[in-house]
Amino acid sequence: MTSRLGLPDLGVGVGLRVPHYRHILDSRPAVDFFEVISENFMVPGGKPRYHLSAVCETYPVVQHGVSLGIGNPTAPADDYLDALRKLVDETKTPWVSDHLCWTGVPGTNLHDLLPLPYTQEVVKRVSERAKRVQDRLGVRLLLENTSSYMSHASSTMPEWEFVSAIAEAADIGLLFDVNNVYVSAYNHGFDPSEFVRSVPHERIVQIHLAGHDNLGRYIIDTHGGHVIDPVWELYRETIERTGPVSTLIEWDDRIPEFPVLAAEAERARRVRAEAVAARAALGGRAPARPRMGVPVRGAAVPQHRAWTQGGPREHEGGSP
Amino acid sequence: MSGVDELQGELAELLTRRRAVDTDPTVSEQCARIATGNDRLSPAQQIEIYREQFWLRHTSCLLEDFEGLGAVLGQSNWERLIEDYLSAHPPTSFSLRDLGDRMPEFVERSSWLPHHDLCVDMARVEWAYIEVFDAPDAAPLDPAELAAIPESAWERARLRLSPALRLVRVGHPVAAFRRSVRLNETDRSLPEPEPQNLVIYRGRDRDLHHQVLGDAAFALLQALSQGLALVPAAERAMARAPHQADRIEHELSAWFADWAARAWIVGVEI
C-alpha cells in the first residue's frame, strides 16, 4: 500500500448515493471504499445517520464536502466545523475533502462551487484558512480543483499555479478531479495536460472521475454519465505521474443501477493498473506521451438541466 | 473590505437576480469587469450559467420539499411564490435541507395565494415532515423501565415524546391530499375544509407516517409535549375537549399502549 502524505491508497471507490442504499446494504457489493457527501449526514438522526452507520460497518468511508466555502469573504463558521469534526470522529475518514471555491457571502449561501480569482491575495486567504481548518478537523484536508464556466478578469495566474500554490503554502492534500480539469480546459481553452503536469503530484491523495454534459459552447459538470475517453486518457496520464492514488467514480445525475457504476469503477481499476505498470517499467518515471492539447468542441446535447453535487438528497420513504 | 470581498458581493447580487443577466444591457459593463468571456460566451453569458443554476437548484429543491403545496398552487403561482420566497429569504444555511424553514410563515403572509388557508395547512405539514425526517433518534420505551414505576408515581410522571414527532392541527385533510400527489394519482381534487388533528412521526421503521387523532387524544398529546405531568395533562385535555372527558378517562391506558408501540412515547420521568 502506497502512502501519500502519510495517507493510504484505498483503491477504487464510488460515491454513496441514495438510489443504491438498498442494494449496498442488502448485497454488500465488492467496493474498495465509499465517499459520502458530509453535509448529507450532518443531521441529528433518522435514515441518513442509520444508513451511514450501516455502510461504515462494512466499508472504509471518506468524507467529501460541498459547503466549506474556503474562499468565501468570511472563514468557515465554527458550528459548521464542529459538526464536521463530529462526523469525522464517527466515520473515521482518513481525510476530509472539499472544493477550492467560494459558495456564498454573508447572508446568502449560493450552494454552488464558484470559481475564485486566481490571485496572490486569494492564495494567501485560502491557504491560511485551510491550515486552520486542517488543524481543527484533526485529519488531512484535501481541496479539489473545481470545474468552471467563467474566468475572472482579475486572475493573474493559471489555475494550476493557483492550486499548487495553495496546496504547498497550506501543506494540505489535493483531491485531483480529472474530469474537472477536462471540463475547465474545454470551457477556457487550455491544454489539460499542462494542468496534470504542473500540480504537485506527491500531494494528490485522491482522484475524482465523472461524466459531464457537453452543450457545445461549453461543458457542464453534471456527473450525469460515463467518463468519456479523453478523461480516461487524462486519468492514465495522471496516474503515470502520481503512482497509485485512491480513485473515485462520481455519478450524481441520471444515476444508473449499481452494476453500471461498479463497471465504471472496474474500468478505473484497469486503467490505474496499466498506468502503474507503465510507470514501474520505467523505474517510477512517467512514460513520455504527447500532450492532449486544447479539447476540440464536441457535439452538443439539447438540454440544459439543473445539476447537483452529491446526487439527490435523501427523503422520506415508506408510505407516501 | 478587500477587492475579492467586493467582487464576491457583486457576483452574489448578479447570481440571485430574478431575470437573466445576459439579456440585460444595464449589467453588461459590470459583467465585463468581472468575467473575461471567450470566443463562445460573453462575460454576461458566463455569469448567466451560474445565475440560472442558482434558481433551478433552489426551486427544484423547494419543490421536492413542498410537493403538495406545488400541486395546490399550480405552475405559475408556485413559481411566483418561490421567487418571492427566495428573494425575501435567500438561503443562509450550509444545508439545502433548511431551505424551506421559513416557508410556513411566508405562505401565511402571502395572502394573494389562491386557496390560502389550504396552502398554509400544507406548508405547515410539509415542513413538519422535513423536521421529523432527520430529527434526533430516541431509544424506544423500555418495558422494564415502565414496570419499575410504582403505581403511586404515575400521578406525577412525565412522558417524554419522541423528538421525531410533530402535532399539527389543520383545517383541511392535507396529509391525504399530499399522499395522492406523491402517488401521482391523477383524479384528485383539492380537499374541502375539514379540521384534523395530525400526528406526523417517524416510525420504528424510520419511515414517516401520519395519524389523524380525535380531539381528546390530541389535546392530551399536546399537553404532554409541553412537559405537563400525566394527571395535569389529562385534566387539561378534559378541559379542552369536555365533550370527550369520559373517553379520556376510559381510553387513557389504551392510548398509552398504542403511543408507546408507535414510539411516540420514548421515556417516563418521575
Image: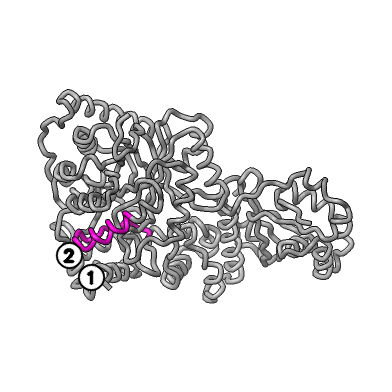
Q: Please determine whether, in this image, residue A249 is positioned above or below residue B97.
A: above
Magenta span includes A116: yes
User: Could you confirm whether marks 2 and 1 are on the same chain?
Assistant: no
Q: According to the image, label 1 marks what residue?
A: B3
B42 up-or-down from A1: above or below:
below
Circle 2 SS class: loop
Examine the image and state in which quarter residue A124 appears.
Answer: bottom left
The span shown in magenta is A111-131
x and y, in percent, of residue A283 in the image: 16, 26
Secondary-structure class at tag 1: helix
Number of other residues with Cα within 10 Å of mark 1, as a class: few under 14, some 14 to 19, many 20 or more: few
At horizontal 47% and vertical 38% (from top left) the residue drawn is: A20
Point out residue B191 in the picture as x, y percentages from the top left corner. Answer: 64, 62
Q: Amino acid at mark 1?
A: Gly
- In this view of the protein, can residue A158 be seen by the observer? yes
In the rendered image, residue B163, in percent from the top left (x then y), is placed at 64, 56
Circle 2/circle 1 CB separation < 8 Å: yes
Q: What residue is shown at x 32% (from left), y 36% (from top)? A: A247
Query: Which of the numbered marks, if any, corresponds to residue A154?
Result: 2
- Where is residue A28? Give x, y as percent: 49, 30
* Chain of the residue on which disc 1 is drawn: B
Q: In the image, A249: left or right of B223?
A: left
